[in-house]
Amino acid sequence: MASQDDGEEPVMEADAEKVQRCCGEIGDGAQTLGDSSAPAPADSAALAVGDSGAQAVGDGTSQALVDGTAQSTEGAQALVDGEIAKASVSNGGDSETDKEVVEFKIIWNKNKYDVKLPLDSTGASLKQTIHSLTGLPPAMQKVMFKGLVSEEKTLRELKVTNGAKVMVVGSTINDVLAVNTPKETIQEEVKAEESKKEPVCRQKQHRKVLDKGKPDDVMPAIKGAPERLPTVPLAGMYNKSGGKVRLTFKLEQDQLWIGTKERTEKIPMGSIKNVITEVIEGHEDYYMMAFQLGPTEASYYWVYWVPMQYVDAIKDTVLGKWQYF
């Protein structure tokens, strides 16, 4: 038994050494692995670069977030603005500026008016525009463009183009009233207007005749006692040249003879359009009188120093008693 134990003991020692050597190798391997896995120590420059890089990365990330947010805000605002603009265009479709318009002229009573209207305006709308320009009521308008304009049709249907001329015929209410106003009323209004003006006898062309004074053979005047025309010529008066003149009424021939030293004019009474009279200031018993022989004032034949008692008789004889002047 003793020899057997002695033989086993060296064997066990050898095995123990192997185990110890293996453990040592394992320990050395672990130390090597540990040393290789540990980070190499960095110097201060490397650490600074690391810090700067980290800061740069942080700053870049932050700025990117800010820029992204700003871009998102701007995009949202652009979207809102776009929607508003789209809504504005949609709502503005009905405004006159967005409509197709046409420019043309309206001609009425020798007056021309420049007009700009949408092509879809109707004839009735055109008449309202004419009313605002001329004062001519729509009911009294006759509007013509290639024929009579219908109130229902549009300018587009009527084929009104730029530069076209639309003719209008009609009378204002004032014109109609003037036509229907009695002659007496018109004459009273004319007299009222004339009374506001400077008296005719003060005008230069008459003053130079009146300043000569009464003719030496003037007929006597009688106030407040109208008389019929005498059977003899009316004499002792001046004409606009300051020459002597006489009036002879040839009733049987229906003529008025105006005689001067040079000649005698025989004028049909029916051709005399009017008789104008005005009292001479400072000599209220005498009148100056004009016979209108033509359409304008230039045709007036003036006679001065007519005795007032014959004024009404002269008017009645020349114009007829149905005339009121």
Image: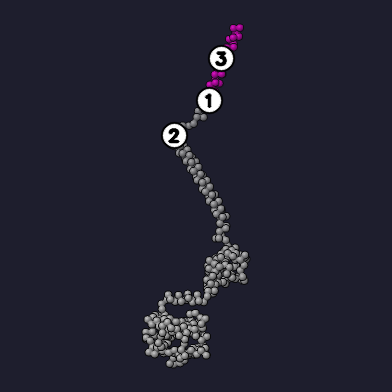
Secondary structure, magenta segment, majority class: helix
The type of residue carrying mark 3 is Glu
Q: Residues within 10 Å of mark 2 (few under 14, many from 20)?
A: few
Seen at 41% across and 83% down, the residue is 223
Q: Position of residue 266 (x, y in %)?
A: 49, 90
Q: As rendered, which of 213 and 251 lies closer to the eye?
A: 251
Q: As rendered, which of 226 and 253 lies closer to the eye?
A: 226
Is residue 17 highlighted in magenta?
yes
Tell me the SS state at disc 2.
loop
| Earlier-in-chain disc, 3 versus 2 | 3
Q: Which residue corresponds to mark 1? A: 30
Name the front one of labels 3 and 1: 1
Of all residues, the one furthest to the bottom in this rendering is 262
Magenta stretch, residue numbers: 1-30
| Earlier-in-chain disc, 1 versus 2 | 1
Q: Which residue corresponds to mark 3? A: 13
Q: As rendered, which of 298 and 59 lies closer to the eye?
A: 298
| Earlier-in-chain disc, 3 versus 1 | 3
Tell me the SS state at disc 1.
helix
Seen at 41% across and 85% down, the residue is 221
Q: Quadrant of residue 144?
A: bottom right
The type of residue carrying mark 2 is Asp
Between marks 3 and 2, how big is the CA–CA gap? Answer: 51 Å
Between marks 1 and 2, how big is the CA–CA gap? Answer: 27 Å
The type of residue carrying mark 1 is Ala
Q: Are marks 3 and 2 in contact (CB under 8 Å)?
A: no
